[in-house]
Image (cartoon, grey):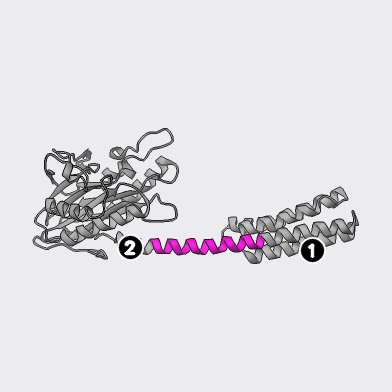
Amino acid sequence: MRSARQYALDAVPFVIMAGVVVAAALAHSSYALLPLLALGPAFAAVSGGVRKTVVAGTTALVLCALMAMYQMVGTWEKYAIDSATVAGVTAAAVMASTIRQRRARELAEVRAIAEVAQQVLLGPVPDVVSSVRLAVRYMSATSHAQIGGDLYEVVPALEGCRLIIGDVQGKGLIAVKTAAAALGAFREVAHDAADLTVIAERIELSLSRQLTAEQFVTAVLAEVSSDGSKIQLLSCGHPPPLLVSGGTSRYIEPAVPGLPLGLAHLAELPRDVTTVPFGPGDQLLFYTDGVSEARNTAGDFYPLSEHEALTTGQEPEAVLDRLQRDVLRHVGHALDDDAAMLLLRREVALAEPGDPGRWGVPTLAG
């Protein structure tokens, strides 16, 4: 359904030409005003398609002839020159409109491909695992695309589930390729790996085949127990998750800071696994630096830990909706970096004891 704004844009070329006619009538002369009729098809090419541009150009030529015929100002040679000007502008406008429409179709195809790629690379996460609800949001900073260098995944494991959220150093297609490699390695091993350190090592091995010395991936690996009562975390140089419990929030910092994936060979100590109790009503927010480092026009970082949505007890989907809107409102423009958020909320007995968990929509490559 067309909006009022679209109808207004459609009318602009014809309003302009009507204004030229009125000005010529008031001035009792069209000698210097005939070329201004070319503004009609020119504006039509900007706001409309080829058909609208042709209609506007034809209207301009008809008005040009009528103004010359009935006002009899100037010479027929001048009229011929002005008419040729209007016709030339109309022809150029039709060509421009044709090119613009072709590019619009190409852009629509790119967006459709991006949506499909997003579904393959970043499939939907399960909405429930045992007594834990999950929700995810992804905002790409890449123009006309919905995917970028941030990554996330949740897969079932022998007990509970395992997840990853990360951020590839760099942007564009290279970052997407690296994210795909990291996710592929995680999906392959996360189901039955002995622990999180084994998963990190397998991802490191996979990335070592394609990353240069300057590239890396920050990430947090997590394992949720089968009853949802505890979560193990392995940080790989990524912003710390935010735990909300009892109305207060705190960042879960590892005792030993871990280097990003791809840089493990530079570490003096192995990565440390942190275990966090996860009680009923608790929430754990994973995110990328596109959220925590989002700046407003004054240069202030987004105050993530102070957002009231995390303490309202709302469903994870509603919480992330509010967070997403607030981040964009804080920045005031399109994000400068990709941003992903993955929220876990412990509910009271969503699954019976010993039940491996009720999964929502499975991931495409899970």
Q: Position of residue 349 (x, y in %)?
A: 15, 57
Specify whether 256 is left or right of 329: left
Specify whether 162 is left or right of 37: left
Which residue type does callout 2 highlight?
A: Gln
Which residue type does callout 1 highlight?
A: Val
Q: Secondary structure at mark 1?
A: helix
Magenta stretch: includes residue 105: yes
Task: Name the residue rendered at 51%, 64% in the picture.
Answer: 105
Quarter of the C terminus within the rendering: bottom left
| Prevalent SS, magenta region | helix
Specify whether 259 is left or right of 56: left
Quarter-wise, where is residue 157 in the image? Answer: bottom left
Task: Name the residue rendered at 41%, 41% in the picture.
Answer: 331
Tag shown at residue 52: none
Q: Secondary structure at mark 2?
A: helix
Task: Name the residue rendered at 10%, 53% in the picture.
Answer: 195
Read off the magenta span: 93-114
Which class describes the residues within 10 Å of circle 2: few (<14), some (14-19), or many (20+)? some
Residue at the disc numbered 2? 119
Specify whether 228 is left or right of 292: left
Residue at the disc numbered 1? 62
Which class describes the residues within 10 Å of circle 1: few (<14), some (14-19), or many (20+)? few
Quarter of the N terminus within the rendering: bottom right
Whole-number angstrom distance, CA of label 1 to CA of label 2: 53 Å
Q: Position of residue 44 (x, y in %)?
A: 66, 58
Q: Nearer the viewer, residue 235 or 2?
A: 235
